[in-house]
Amino acid sequence: MTDDSSDARFERALSARSELAPDEAVALARLSLEELSIDRALERCSQLICGRPAPPKTAAPSSVCGLVWKTGDIVYHCRTCGMDPSCAICHDCFLNSDHTGHDFWMFSSGGGCCDCGDVEA
């Protein structure tokens, strides 16, 4: 079970990561991640990779996202949900949807737009 102290230690590690030696930052992050559930650990790793907090969870997105991403943005491809190999969704849409047990991967974009909510994508 996650407690406030592990979250607080992680937040300190995240905010101080540029001021700490790399091995110190990794040790702090590892200590904090070891105490989290898999879902929370993945959220925290995404936060470290993307450099911003996870978006708030929404009840049920009902519209097309269409976010245009830049080269280097983190995006996801889900073979289970996507209609074709070119379908991709942005980081926020991925975190706000359930891909448990799906065949997906994360990659660095070369540009494009989010297909979340697009029934033809």
Image (tube, rainbow, N blue to C red):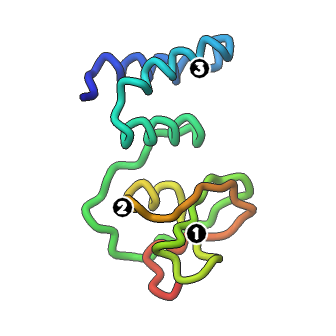
Q: Residues within 10 Å of mark 3 (few under 14, many from 20)?
A: some
Q: CA distance from mark 1 to mark 3?
A: 30 Å
Secondary structure under tag 1 reads loop
Q: Which circle marks residue 26 in the picture?
A: 3
Secondary structure under tag 2 reads loop
User: Which of the two labelled residues, at mark 1 and mark 2, occupies the earlier sequence position?
Assistant: 1
Q: Give residue 69's position: percent from left, percent from top.
A: 64, 61
Q: Is residue 60 above or below residue 3?
A: below
- Residue type pointed to by label 3: Val
- Residue type pointed to by label 2: Asp
Query: Residue 95 lies in what quarter of the image?
Result: bottom left
Q: Give residue 112's position: percent from left, percent from top.
A: 67, 69
User: Which of the two labelled residues, at mark 1 and mark 3, occupies the earlier sequence position?
Assistant: 3
The residue where tag 1 is placed is 88
Left or right: where 31 falls relative to 86: left
The residue that appears at 30% across and 58% down in the rendered structure is 58
Determine contact: label 3, label 2, CB under 8 Å: no
Determine contact: label 1, label 2, CB under 8 Å: no
Q: CA distance from mark 3 to mark 2?
A: 29 Å
Q: Give residue 61's position: percent from left, percent from top.
A: 33, 69
Q: Give residue 110's position: percent from left, percent from top.
A: 75, 62
Q: Residues within 10 Å of mark 1 (few under 14, many from 20)?
A: many
The residue where tag 2 is placed is 98
Q: Residues within 10 Å of mark 2 (few under 14, many from 20)?
A: few
Left or right: where 86 falls relative to 89: right
Left or right: where 52 falls relative to 36: right
Determine contact: label 1, label 3, CB under 8 Å: no
Q: Which circle marks residue 46 in the picture?
A: none
Near-viewer residue (57 or 81): 81
